[in-house]
Image: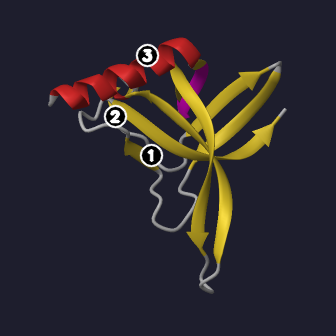
Amino acid sequence: MSDFAKQIAKGLSSIRDIAGRQITYKRGGESLTLTAAVGDRNVDVATDYGVVEKVRVRQYLFSAKDLVLSNVKTQPQRGDLIVEIDAAVSRTYEITSPGGSVPDWQYSDAGRSTIRVFTRLIDES
């Protein structure tokens, strides 16, 4: 990994350390707690009719090495869930592509140390 890529990975880690939130990552009956940087983003998505719509998505950035389920390092899958609790309100987000050319998830750095997932809100209580 280049020095620049190492600095980017270090910066992403610092963001999680300073501004990260505790989230619960779920797949089936398994779950784990991760620290993630959280943000909202507008994404342009072309519809089947050729119209471009703005879609607001919630994204989470967390360490790739921390995503371990059944003692196996894994990658995000469409349909996995993220639960975020803020001010006693629990919100559940589903990992999914907002559409267009935007994937469900991607690495955020050349060293593949940080994962970024895109989600949509499916439940709030």
Task: Check disc 1 and report its element: helix, strand or loop.
Answer: loop
Check if mark 2's residue and mark 1's residue have beta carbons within 8 Å: yes
The answer to if 25 sits in the magenta stretch is yes
Q: Residues within 10 Å of mark 2 (few under 14, many from 20)?
A: few
Mark 3 or mark 2, which is nearer to you? 3
Which residue is disc 3 drawn over? 14
Residue 53 percent across, percent down from the top left: 67, 70
Q: Looking at the image, which residue sits at the far left?
A: 1
Residue 43 against residue 70 in the figure, above or below: below
Question: Looking at numbered disc 3 in the image, what kind of residue is underneath it?
Answer: Ser
Residue that badge 1 annotates: 77
Q: CA distance from mark 2 to mark 1?
A: 9 Å
How many numbered marks have been drawn onto this rendered protein structure? 3
- The answer to whether 9 appears left or right of 44 in the picture is left
Tell me where residue 40 appears, x and y as whole percent: 64, 42
Rendered view: 58 above or below 86: below
Bounds of the magenta segment: 22-26
Residue at figure coordinates x 82%, y 19% from the top left: 87
Q: Tell me which residue sits at (23%, 33%) in the image.
A: 111
- What is the magenta segment's predominant secondary structure? strand
Residue 28 can be seen, yes or no: no
Q: Are marks 1 and 3 in contact (CB under 8 Å)?
A: no
Q: Quadrant of the N terminus?
A: top left
Q: Earlier in the sequence, mark 1 or mark 3?
A: 3
Determine the residue located farthest toward the top in the rendered image: 18
Query: What type is the residue that disc 2 sits on?
Result: Thr
Is residue 28 shown above or below 34? below
Q: Which residue is mark 2?
A: 74
Q: Residue 119, position in %: x, y?
A: 60, 46
